[in-house]
Amino acid sequence: MATSLKLQNQKMELIQWLSTIEDHSVIERLLAFKQQENQDWFNSLSEAEQSAIEKGIDDADAGQLHPHSKAKKLYERWL
């Protein structure tokens, strides 16, 4: 509950700050940030990354899965 109250207070602080901004370039940057946040992250990936994810989904749908222990062993040097 305390976290929720803190978040609400932070939002109010931002709203109050936003209402005082007079610099048009700051408003434009905030609007660009808002638009970027609303975009689907998948679309920002390269075609190769998108293909790899789609292949993984297709493999999972087809039941071609491997246990976590096998993946962990395969990638242990990076973990």
Image (cartoon, rainbow, N blue to C red):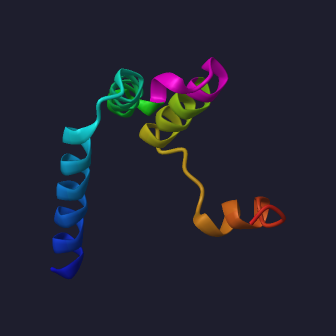
> Who is closer to the viewer here, 18 or 6?
18
Residue 6 location (% of width, % of height):
23, 72
Q: Quadrant of residue 64?
A: top right
Badge count: 0
> Who is closer to the viewer here, 38 or 13?
13
Residue 54 part of the magenta-drawn span: no
Residue in the image at 26% along x and 48% along y: 17
Residue 43 part of the magenta-drawn span: yes
Residue in the image at 46% along x and 37% along y: 62
Of all residues shown, which one is farthest toward the right?
Answer: 77
Q: Please, what is the dominant secondary structure of the magenta stretch?
A: helix
In the image, 59: left or right of 61? Answer: right
Q: Quadrant of residue 9?
A: bottom left
Residue in the image at 59% along x and 65% along y: 68
Residue 39 location (% of width, % of height):
37, 26
Q: Is residue 67 above or below residue 1?
A: above
Q: Is residue 61 above or below residue 28?
A: below
> Who is closer to the viewer here, 23 or 39?
23
Residue 28 location (% of width, % of height):
37, 22
Of all residues shown, which one is farthest toward the top?
Answer: 47
Q: Quadrant of residue 74?
A: bottom right
Of all residues shown, which one is farthest toward the bottom?
Answer: 2
Residue 1 location (% of width, % of height):
15, 80
In the image, 79: left or right of 42? Answer: right
In the image, 49: left or right of 54? Answer: right
In the image, the segment drawn in magenta is 42-50
Q: Quadrant of the C terminus?
A: bottom right
